[in-house]
Amino acid sequence: MTDALTDNILVLVRHGESEWNRLNLFTGWRNPDLTEKGVIEARVAGRMIRDNGAKFDIAFTSVLKRAQHTLDIILSELDQPDVPIVRDAALNERDYGELSGLNKDEARKKWGEAQVRDWRRSYDIPPPGGESLKDTLARVRPYYDSAIWPQITQSKNVIIVAHGNSLRSLIMILEGLSGDEILQRELATGAPILYRLGADGRAIDRKDLLPARSLAAPPEDRIV
């Protein structure tokens, strides 16, 4: 185990595998819970964070139970169950609108392969009734600026457990990435990312605690 971290840190974790992740369905704002595998992923994430010496002052998560359940498991593994938790819809997954509840084949039959690919893989094209990644960033950025960053400036260590696309939005902010750059990043379920931040809110150091699972581009047929 490493010595306890003394610098201010921010840890991001995507929730563990959900029931709809297992079925490869567009989930968005729908509210399935974790699978047994997802529970195990959350426990492993907690142990990895613990082994890196992290102690948290405050936690943020979405209003969706797969993220909240993951956070609860992580804090239990860290033996930090009393960390204050802030829950906000600003950290929810991208809203997939009419795609929600469908798998890729069902969506492709309804709208055509090219259209579905554009909705899934573009930065600024939303599905019907839903959000693009650009739209997701538009709600995540002001929430980060108003709620999360002030905690960090008060020398508090922060953990955020959220979703693939709300976390992509945060990574864009922290690392100064473009929409095209962030779309090449896969965020595996239950894989923690540990940041040390500079005075301007940008990352000065990043450590993937499960790097083999979190750096590759997403498979083409996998819904993320």
Image: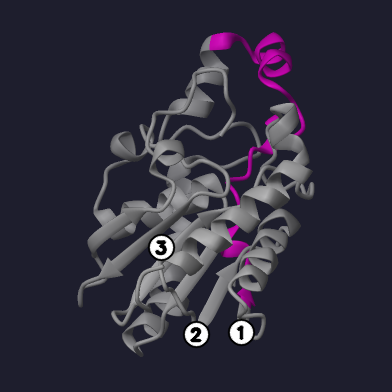
Read off the residue under disc 1.
84
User: Which badge, 1 or 2, comes first in the chain's sequence?
Assistant: 2
Question: Which quarter of the figure has residue 21?
Answer: top right
Per the image, label 2 sits on a secondary structure element best described as loop
**In the displayed structure, does residue 135 sit left or right of residue 175?**
right
Q: Amino acid at mark 1?
A: Pro
Classed neighbour count for the residue bearing mark 3: other residues with Cα under 10 Å, few (<14), some (14–19), many (≥20)? some
The crowding category of the residue bearing disc 1, from other C-alpha atoms within 10 Å (few below 14, some 14 to 19, many at least 20), is: few
Question: What secondary structure is found at the residue carrying circle 1?
Answer: loop
Q: CA distance from mark 3 to mark 2?
A: 21 Å
Q: Residue at x 51, y 41 (%)?
A: 188
What residue is pinned by disc 2? Answer: 57
Q: CA distance from mark 1 to mark 2?
A: 7 Å
* Side of 140 where 111 appears, left or right: right
Residue 142: quadrant of the picture: bottom left
Q: Residue furthest bottom?
A: 154
Q: Can you tell which of label 3 and label 1 is closer to the viewer?
A: 1
Residue 150 disc label:
none
Please tell me which residue lies in front, 128 or 182. 182
Judged left or right of residue 128, residue 65 is right
**x, y percent for residue 61:** 60, 66
Magenta stretch: give its range.
86-113
- 27 left or right, relative to 6: right
Q: Position of residue 129 (x, y in %)?
A: 66, 38
> Which three-letter amino acid code belongs to the residue tagged 3?
Arg
Residue depicted at 29% across the width and 37% down the height: 181
Task: Determine which residue is flagged by label 3.
Answer: 141
Residue 149, percent across and down? 37, 77
